[in-house]
Amino acid sequence: MHYRRYLKRKNYSNHTIKNYLNRLKHFLVWLPVPVELAEPVHVKHYIDTLLEKRLGPQTINGHLVAIRSFYYYLQDEEELEVANPAVRGLALRLPDPLPRHLQGHQVAALFSAITKKRDLAMFMLMLRCGLRVEEVANLTLGAIDYGRNQIMVRCGKGAKDRIVFINIDAADVLAAYLQIRPSTPEQRIFLVEKGMYKGKPISVRGIQKRIEYYSRKSGVPVSCHQLRHTMATELLNAGADVVTLQYLLGHRRIKTTMRYARLSNQKARNDYYLSMTKVEEKSGTTVTWNVRC
């Protein structure tokens, strides 16, 4: 399909291309008129249909992006004189909740419930290195550089490569898993350990099912992405720079990383008192209050 090649030329990841094609398929099956006759009113009705299916605003906006991209393709590549029905202004307003992270006692409770060396290594990479679940699933043996204590994350979100650093506790549990990992030509690190797919790379959904299992076992409500949120929050509270965190997390926009800065109230507290101390030292005065009881 030419549209698939069009998306590949834009350097979209395979995951993104799959989502675009799937969302476009649903729209074209629903569309009551030929593709070239679609108008904004049709897209509005389609949004209503998705809302009736109880899809969230972010998911629905993803459908709009896929539809809009397809019509750009028709205009630019196929040179068809068609209007793009997915006009600007149709997107749903998104809530802006703060990222949820784990408290120290929750981290301890969760990891005390993890007994498998493979699972411990997977989730420590999320907690200490900030890897996404897809990045853990696709991690290969050649990406680990123990000499430099770093990991090359290839084709992360947005098909971008980046280097992350591995702390000693994460390095130790990863090394412990690699010692018992079956010898196999498969380069991806984390493998299925039983069943008909034994020895095959574990899937993203397989990893998510493991964290769901440990969440029930430990009584800690947690997802894979919350481990990444926890790393980001802990680094900011410890004084890490937002730009550094942006690089480590692989965020394209600093605005995304700044959401963690809003959450990092401990850093704000520390910065406030440190700065206020400097203000007082510079002015040479300390304000005191005469309060009558």
Image (cartoon, rainbow, N blue to C red):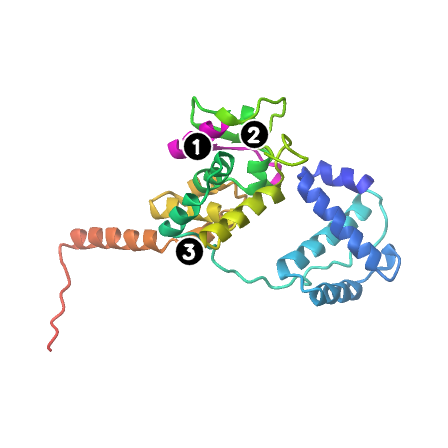
Q: Residue at x 78, y 66 (%)?
A: 41
Which residue in the protein does label 2 denote?
189
Residue 181, percent from left and from top: 54, 27
Out of 207 and 282, give the one closest to the viewer.
207
Instruction: State whether residue 40 is above or below residue 151.
Output: below
The residue sitting at the right extreme is 34
Which residue in the protein does label 3 denote?
262
Out of 189 and 60, give the one closest to the viewer.
189
- Left of 237 or right of it: where is 204? right
Out of 104 and 196, give the one closest to the viewer.
196
Work out how far the residue at label 1 is from the one at label 3, CA to CA, in angstroms: 32 Å
Residue 57, percent from left and from top: 63, 61
First reached walking from the N terminus: tag 1 or tag 3: 1
Q: Amino acid at mark 2?
A: Ile
Residue 225 visible at all: yes
Q: Residue at x 72, y 48 (%)?
A: 20
- Left of 176 or right of it: where is 79? right
* Element under disc 3: helix
Residue 198, percent from left and from top: 64, 32
Work out how far the residue at label 3 is from the one at label 2, CA to CA, in angstroms: 35 Å
Work out how far the residue at label 1 is from the one at label 2, CA to CA, in angstroms: 13 Å
First reached walking from the N terminus: tag 1 or tag 2: 1
Instruction: State whether residue 273 is above or below residue 287.
Output: above
Residue 83 visible at all: no
How many numbered marks are there? 3
Mark 1 neighbour density, 10 Å: few (under 14) some (14–19) many (20 or more): some
* Element under disc 1: helix
Q: Amino acid at mark 3?
A: Arg
Q: Residue at x 65, y 36 (%)?
A: 195
Which residue in the protein does label 1 denote?
173
Magenta stretch: residue 132 in it? no
Q: Which residues are magenta?
A: 158-178
